[in-house]
Image: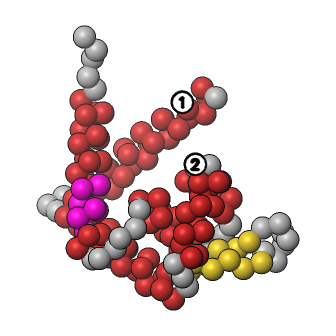
């Protein structure tokens, strides 16, 4: 019988509860986008004038997959491509007015879910949770980088 990790199980349950809250929040807000599209849209909002490669690197995803997601967002009028001033092979990505509006709506849904999740916890508890979660992420990423 394999040994269970209580920490892993707790994180698994937290992730699923958060994902469920996000899906419900997006549905209530009328946001009908895939998780990938939402993540790319948020990445563009965070990194003004970024490129598909920047988004792919940050998300640790294949650039081809990111390019397909960006293509859908461009086709739907949420993102525009601009020539990169320093690299003629690259294009900068920017949100359109409709893309900024959607990014704002997504941020509002996430803020509500975060508030619900943190209900009743002190600022110190939240700061410690963030510190611990960042350390765990670094541990996992470090062990993955060493395995490569």
Disc 2 or 1, which lies upstream in sequence? 2
Q: Which residue is at the front of the view, 104 or 130?
A: 104
Relative to 90, is 73 on the left or the right? left
Identified at 54% across, 30% down, the residue is 143
Count the numbered circles shown: 2
Q: Quadrant of the N terminus?
A: top left
Specify few, some or many for label 2: CA neighbours under 10 Å numbering under 14, 14-19, or 20 or more: few
Residue 66 image label? none
Assess whether residue 23 is covered by the magenta stretch: yes
Looking at the rendering, which quadrant does residue 80 occupy? bottom right
Please state the horizontal and vertical placement of residue 41, each as a whole percent of the image.
50, 70
Please give the range of residues in magenta: 19-25
**Residue located beneath label 2 in the image:** 60
Assess whether residue 85 is covered by the magenta stretch: no
Q: Is residue 4 above or below residue 11?
A: above
- Farthest bottom residue in view: 97
Identified at 24% across, 29% down, the residue is 6
Q: Which residue is at the front of the view, 117 or 135?
A: 117
Looking at the rendering, which quadrant does residue 127 occupy? bottom left
Identified at 54% across, 82% down, the residue is 77
**Closer to us: mark 2 or mark 1?**
2
Please state the horizontal and vertical placement of residue 82, each as a whole percent of the image.
72, 79
Residue 143 image label? 1
Specify few, some or many for label 1: CA neighbours under 10 Å numbering under 14, 14-19, or 20 or more: few
Q: Which residue is at the front of the view, 87 or 47?
A: 87
Looking at the rendering, which quadrant does residue 55 occupy? bottom right
Q: Is residue 28 visible?
A: yes
The main secondary structure of the magenta stretch is helix
């Amino acid at each position: 019988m394999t040994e269970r990790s209580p920490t892993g199980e707790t994180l698994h349950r937290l992730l699923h509860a958060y994902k469920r809250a996000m899906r419900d929040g997006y549905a209530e807000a009328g946001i009908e986008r895939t998780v990938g599209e939402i993540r790319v849209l948020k990445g563009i909002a965070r990194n003004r004038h970024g490129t598909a490669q920047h988004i792919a690197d940050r998300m640790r995803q294949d650039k081809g997959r990111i390019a397909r997601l960006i293509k859908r967002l461009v086709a739907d009028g949420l993102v525009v491509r601009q020539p990169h001033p320093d690299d003629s092979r690259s294009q900068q990505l920017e949100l359109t007015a409709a893309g900024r509006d959607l990014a704002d709506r997504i941020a509002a849904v996430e803020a509500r879910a975060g508030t619900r999740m943190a209900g009743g916890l002190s600022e110190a508890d939240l700061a410690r949770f963030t510190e611990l979660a960042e350390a765990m992420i670094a541990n996992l990423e470090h062990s993955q980088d060493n395995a490569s």
